[in-house]
Amino acid sequence: MRSPSIGRRTRPAYPVLLLVAALAAGCGAPTGRADRWQEPSPIATAAQPAEPAPPVASSSAAPSPARTDVKRVFPVRAGNVDYHPTHGGYPGTDVFADCGEPVVAVTDGVVLEVSRVDRFDKRGPLGPNNGGLSVSLLGDDGVRYYGSHLSAITAGVDAGVRVRAGQQLGEVGRTGNANNVCHLHFGLSPKCTGADDWWTRRGVVWPAPYLNSWRKGGNRSPVTEVTAWQRKHGCPAAPGRSTRSG
């Protein structure tokens, strides 16, 4: 293969050297990335999706998002709070606190979905509207953090808005399928694209071990477990057998 630049040279003294130099400059081995689930960086998920990602983000082949130093906090800011280590039907946790207590962002990230209207109807369909008022956040660590049954959502908390760890998102409530009990349903999941994936958003790994850490001021990360779940299950196109609380 001849370099186009060689044909334009008027000095024929060094054709072999020029050809070698051209090949060395332009025929290096390409660098590729294996297909993997979405692990957006803070730039890719910010409120300006049209902005191209910087070269550093596009060239990284690391299996986890760029930010691994994120801070995490307990999702309810209250003195009187408790939660179950398990949950009926699928992985999740119900965090019990008085209605009106602040629900906060677990970590820095971008708001993904917000539901400000309680559309739950016990006559059905069960599942899509079980959460009532809810907010989901895509953390800078690539994990989606979901909270539902809120009584109110803070003004300005809308899809695409960037929030910081500890920033108030709403208030504990009992909207949706909360059985008239004040609590926050809390779920951890990967972000799946496409149609509303409430069956994934409500939670796919058990949050209690992480809540235990954050409540004590620790910073245990759910990234490894959520990533492993995603690699095994992908993005399910439909819910599992149970469509109960959520």
Image (cartoon, rainbow, N blue to C red):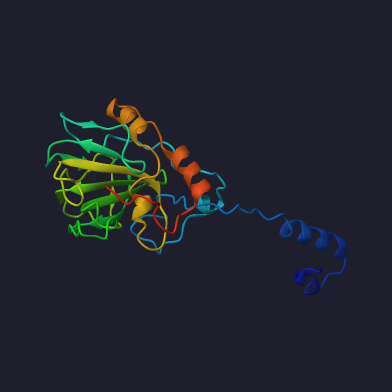
x, y percentage for residue 206? 37, 37
In the displayed structure image, the side of residue 18 where residue 70 appears, left or right:
left
Q: Is residue 194 visible?
A: yes
Q: Is residue 66 visible?
A: no
Residue at 19% across / 58% down in the picture? Answer: 121
Compared to 171, does 77 lie above or below?
above
In the displayed structure image, the side of residue 90 where residue 99 appears, left or right:
left
Quarter of the image for the N terminus: give it: bottom right
In the displayed structure image, the side of residue 98 where residue 85 appears, left or right:
right
x, y percentage for residue 17? 84, 59
Residue at 87% across / 62% down in the picture? Answer: 16
Residue at 24% across / 51% down in the picture? Answer: 131
In the displayed structure image, the side of residue 17 where residue 42 appears, left or right:
left
Residue at 41% across / 37% down in the picture? Answer: 222
Q: Looking at this view, name the residue that lies furthest to the top.
A: 216
x, y percentage for residue 35? 57, 54
Front residue of 14/141: it is 141
Front residue of 48/38: it is 38
Q: How many numbered markers are drawn?
A: 0
- Looking at the rendering, which quadrant does residue 68 occupy? top left
- Looking at the rendering, which quadrant does residue 21 occupy? bottom right
x, y percentage for residue 13? 88, 65
